[in-house]
Amino acid sequence: MTVSWTPHRFSGGVLALDAANTVVLRGDPVRSFDRFADVAEIARFAEAASLHRSEELDGRRLIVEDARNIAPKVLSIREATDRLFRSAAQEGSIAAAELAALLVACAAGLGSLGERFDATDRPFRAVQTPLAFEAALAVSALSLLQPARLSRIRICANCRWLFVDGSRNRSRLWCDMAVCGNRRKAQRHYRRRRVEDNGHA
Ligand SMILES: [Zn+2]
């Protein structure tokens, strides 16, 4: 079944975290699944990301010429991104081994391309030609190492997705208030009702 790449699936705030979040319920051995298990979804994700991440990408379109060919690079950037930034969000520090793994994975994504990136906080602005997805993913992940970004990476209290907290007081709990925030509120309401119905306080 094909995935519907809705705006909710781009709640990470940046391309690299949206990609990390394509593994659903990480750490849950029973319910976890990978939306990129069908490599055709990598191309469909890239197409949707061109739209939902157009601000970060400065309007550049992402291209996937051969999904099967780039899949190993994409998956290794995605997994290294999740490991490093999830542990950074939890520990407040970066593990050297995880940084090394991310750099190696990103090097493979960038390796053979004759791209140049803008030397500002808008790396994709340099040119307007379509951009290889694996290269965009690498640049997006590396951009998260900037301290201002790094200190704002959070883990959703409901679904455990990673997201950048852009709120003024840095207090966002949910990847998407409309989905995860409301789901948690409904659960709490249901539990309270059940306790009351059972005659307990
Ligand atoms: Zn969530």
Image (cartoon, rainbow, N blue to C red):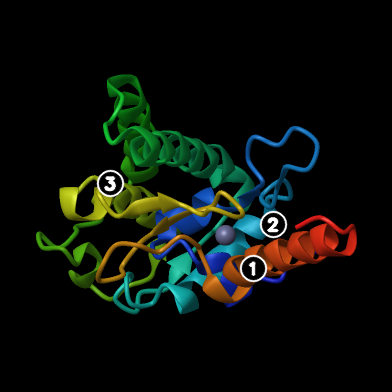
Q: Secondary structure at mark 1?
A: helix
Q: Residues within 10 Å of mark 3 (few under 14, many from 20)?
A: some
Residue bearing the label numbered 2 = 40
Q: Amino acid at mark 2?
A: Ala
Find disc 3 in the rendering and name its residue.
142
Q: CA distance from mark 3 to mark 1?
A: 35 Å
Name the image quarter holding residue 100.
top left
Ligand 1's image quarter is: bottom right
Q: CA distance from mark 3 to mark 2?
A: 25 Å
User: Which labelled disc corresponds to residue 185?
Assistant: 1
Quick check: 97 left or right of 8? Answer: left
Identity of the residue drawn at 40% across and 51% down: 154
> Which residue is painted at 50% across and 66% down in the image?
11
Disc 3 CB within 8 Å of nearest ligand 1 atom: no
Q: Position of residue 92 (x, y in %)?
A: 28, 36
Q: Is residue 108 above or below residue 110?
A: above
Viewer-nearest of discs 2 and 1: 1
Q: Position of residue 178 (x, y in %)?
A: 58, 76
In the figure, 163 relative to 28: above or below? below
Q: Quadrant of the N terminus?
A: bottom right
Q: Residue at x 45, y 67 (%)?
A: 62
Screen quadrant of the C terminus:
bottom right
Where disc 2 sits, the SS reads helix
